[in-house]
Amino acid sequence: MYAAQGINAYAQVSLESKLSGATPHQLISMLYEGAHNAILRAKIYSEQGNTARRGEMVSKAINIIDNGLRAALDHEKGKAIAADLEQLYEYMSRTLLQANLNNKPELFAHVDELLMRQAETWKEIAP
């Protein structure tokens, strides 16, 4: 029990250290990674029949997409690109919700593929 608490505390400190020293570009990369991990876990839980944990991971992924990636869009500077990304993120969130409600693991894979393409593009434009 104490070992698990120690590991969790260490992980929290490690995450906080990464966040505090990250550039805005790196923060967006971390959001992509967090959403990716949540989607992968949702797919695994779906395949295992663990509906509750699948729902938690879908909620986490949607939260990252909506309150992280979508919220970070700058519609003043980005104009058309920001509008296109807004639509893509909205599609991803809606599809994840459908995947969860209808237990369709293939939709998790579809959204994850779209997300990873965006993440790769983001890495390529690193300053």
Image (cartoon, helix red, strand yellow):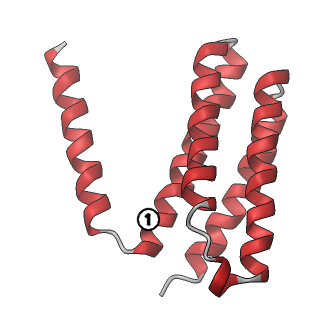
Q: Residue at x 69, y 30 (%)?
A: 43
The quarter of the picture where residue 20 lies is bottom left
On screen, residue 62 versus residue 37, left or right, reads: right
Against 70, is 7 above or below? above
Q: Residue at x 63, y 87 (%)?
A: 77
How many numbered markers are drawn? 1
Please state which of residues 109 and 85 is positioned toward the viewer in this rendering.
85
Residue 112, percent across and down?
71, 48
The quarter of the picture where residue 8 lies is top left
Q: Residue at x 43, y 73 (%)?
A: 24
Against 9, is 93 above or below? below
Dot 1: few (<14), some (14–19), or many (≥20) neighbours within 10 Å? some
Please state which of residues 64 and 116 is positioned toward the viewer in this rendering.
64
Q: Residue at x 84, y 27 (%)?
A: 104
Against 125, is 25 above or below? above
Q: Quadrant of the N terminus?
A: top left
Please state which of residues 58 and 122 is positioned toward the viewer in this rendering.
58
Residue beneath disc 1: 27
Residue 54, percent across and down?
64, 23
Residue 87, percent across and down?
81, 61
